Image (cartoon, grey):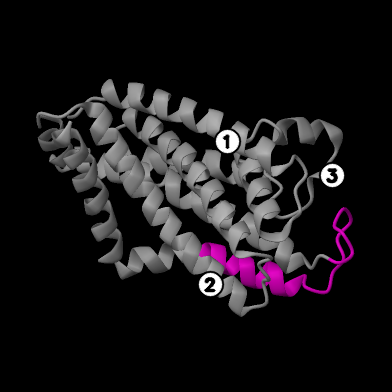
Amino acid sequence: MNREFAAIYVLWLRALKRFIRSPSQIIGSVAMPLLFLIFLGLGFSNVKFPGLPSNLDYIDFLVPGILGMSMLFAATTAGISLLWDRQFGFLKEVMVAPVSRLSIMLGRTLGGVTTAFIQSIMLIIFSILIGFKIISVLGLIASFIFMLLIGLIFVSLGLIIASVMSDIQGFGLILNLLIFPLFFLSGALYPLNVLPKYVRYIVYLNPLTYGIDGIRGALINFSIFGETNDFIILLIVAAASLSIGAHAFSKAKIV
């Protein structure tokens, strides 16, 4: 058991060190969410969107959506590191270690979630500097829980895709095909109640929808589904994603 925990810790620490030691990766991963935040948040700061309460500024509505976007983008791209490790032989060395593949998968997952989490905290700090208002410290802590669940779901998704692929370029194309519809159909940029009814049915199938709604409820007390419902749905999806990810990773080719 100690060996399994050691494997999880070492792989988590490796992912964290690789992220911290790569300034270009940090800047690149935060740049797009920041651009969305600056151009949309400040550009539409005086616009009153239909479906929003009159006392809610658009910047306050937007920030939870951008946090969800940051977790989505950072988490799903964690699968790229798996492909690089496979290509350069590191994955083969890890796989022959006397630990279970589940521990290896968990270590990689937690590493991806942690780096995504760091990016989101950086965005929260910047958001406060440009006028975002957090209603309470407890709400901030609750939002971290929702971000953690989003990270677990989409890191698992990235690893599932990477487990069945060997082409890094192809992985990037598949990823773009998935993450942009997931982002735009999540209510991150606009209220869900203004969407056509047939679009809402698609939005309700998107786990990111409930993650952003939960973050929004925790940070600004504006939630459509209710924070408890959001948490339960995300918890179920996260458990299913981790289970499928562990199975896919156990069947992955190491060469």
The Cα atoms of the two marked residues, 3 and 1, are separated by 21 Å
**Vertically, is 83 above or below 236?**
below
Instruction: Tell me the residue that label 1 is attached to.
Output: 234
Which label belongs to residue 125? 2
Q: Earlier in the sequence, mark 2 or mark 1?
A: 2
Q: Mark 2 Cα within 10 Å, few/some/many (few <14, many 20+)?
A: few
How many residues crowd around disc 3 within 10 Å: few (fewer than 14), some, or many (20 or more)?
few
Relative side of 175 to 37, left or right:
left
> Looking at the image, is mark 3 or mark 1 earlier in the sequence?
3
Would you identify the image quadrant in which residue 97 lies? top left
Near mark 1 (Cα within 10 A), the count class, few <14, some 14-19 or many ≥20, is: many
Which quadrant of the view contains residue 110? top left
Range drawn in magenta: 32-55
Amino acid type, callout 1: Leu
* Residue in the picture at 84% in, 69% down: 47
Residue that label 3 marks: 193
Frontmost of labels 3 and 1 is: 1
Residue pictured at 34% horizontal, 26% vertical: 246
Q: Where is residue 139 in the image (x, y as percent from the top left)?
A: 62, 58
Q: Where is residue 111 in the image (x, y as percent from the top left)?
A: 32, 48
Question: In this picture, is 231 found above or below 34?
Answer: above
Instruction: Tell me how far mark 2 sits from mark 1, CA to CA.
Output: 25 Å
Location of the N terminus (image quadrant) = top left
Image quarter (top left, top right, bottom left or bottom right) of the C terminus:
top left
* Residue 87 in sight: no
Q: In this view, does 151 lie to the left or right of 159?
A: right
> Looking at the image, can residue 68 be seen?
yes
CA distance separating discs 2 and 3: 29 Å
What x and y, as percent, mark residue 203? Answer: 71, 36
Q: Nearer the viewer, residue 207 or 27?
A: 207
| Label 2 SS | helix
